[in-house]
Amino acid sequence: MEISDLLTVENVITDLRVTSKKQALQILSKHAANNTGQDERDIFEILSQRERLGTTGVGDGRAIPHGHLLGLKKIQGYFARLEKAIDFDSIDDSPVDLIFLLLAPKGSGAEHLKALALISRLMRSNVLCEKLRGANNADALYALLSRSPQTRSNLRAAS
């Protein structure tokens, strides 16, 4: 599985203007609804339920909200770089400015976990995240996120 299997350039948002975790999840839910044909409120509710179980703010300004959605055909990712970092109740209490949202079909257990592991490894790279923070547009963000596995390994090794 590659990031390009989960994410398209159309699902990359540059300089998203939000002031709260709730607003970020609402806007990402709306974007996902437009892309999937699923109900925006259903997507937001699934993400909110997951956040109530424990924060998906993984630290160092990064968050990976995720959930299973009934009726979704395939696993899909959405990436947003925020204009200004927001409180996300992160495990390290640091504000978040990079969000990678993952939605998976109900019953996609193993595939969902593989996708989540891939995103987690990718977002753990300090080198990559600094490049994402400095990228100019959605195409540049997508190019950084969808590099080959060898390049991701090199980025991880360098962080």
Image (cartoon, helix red, strand yellow):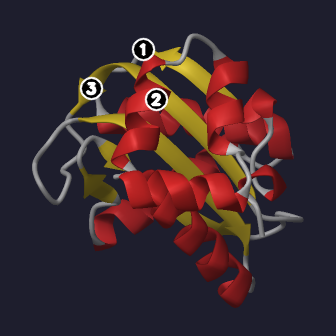
Indicate which disc residue 85 carries: 3
How far across and how far down the image is residue 124, in percent?
A: 39, 57
How far across and how far down the image is residue 83, in percent?
A: 38, 15
Indicate which disc residue 17 carries: 1
Residue at the spot 18% in from the left edge and 50% down from the top edge: 89
Quadrant of the image occupied by residue 126: top left
How far across and how far down the image is residue 67, in percent?
A: 57, 66
How far across and how far down the image is residue 144, in percent?
A: 63, 36
- Badge 2 marks a residue whose secondary structure is helix
| Mark 3 Cα-neighbour bin, 10 Å: few <14, some 14–19, many ≥20 | many
Mark 2 in CB contact with mark 3 (< 8 angstroms): no
Tell me the amino acid under the disc marked 2.
Lys
Q: Which of 133 and 64 is in front in this view?
A: 133
- Badge 1 marks a residue whose secondary structure is loop
**Dividing the image into 4 quarters, which one contains the N terminus?**
bottom right
* Label 2 – label 3 distance at C-alpha: 16 Å
Which mark is first along the chain, 1 or 2?
1
Please name which of the two marks, 2 or 3, marks the residue nearer to the observer: 2
Please name which of the two marks, 2 or 1, marks the residue nearer to the observer: 2
Which mark is first along the chain, 3 or 2?
3
Mark 1 in CB contact with mark 3 (< 8 angstroms): no
Tell me the amino acid under the disc marked 1.
Arg
Indicate which disc residue 131 carries: 2
In the image, residue 77 above or below residue 149: above
Residue at the spot 74% in from the left edge and 53% down from the top edge: 148
| Mark 2 Cα-neighbour bin, 10 Å: few <14, some 14–19, many ≥20 | some
Q: Please indicate whether residue 73 sits to the left or right of residue 27 in the image.
A: right
Indicate which disc residue 56 carries: none
Residue at the spot 68% in from the left edge and 89% down from the top edge: 110
* Label 1 – label 3 distance at C-alpha: 9 Å
Which mark is first along the chain, 3 or 1?
1
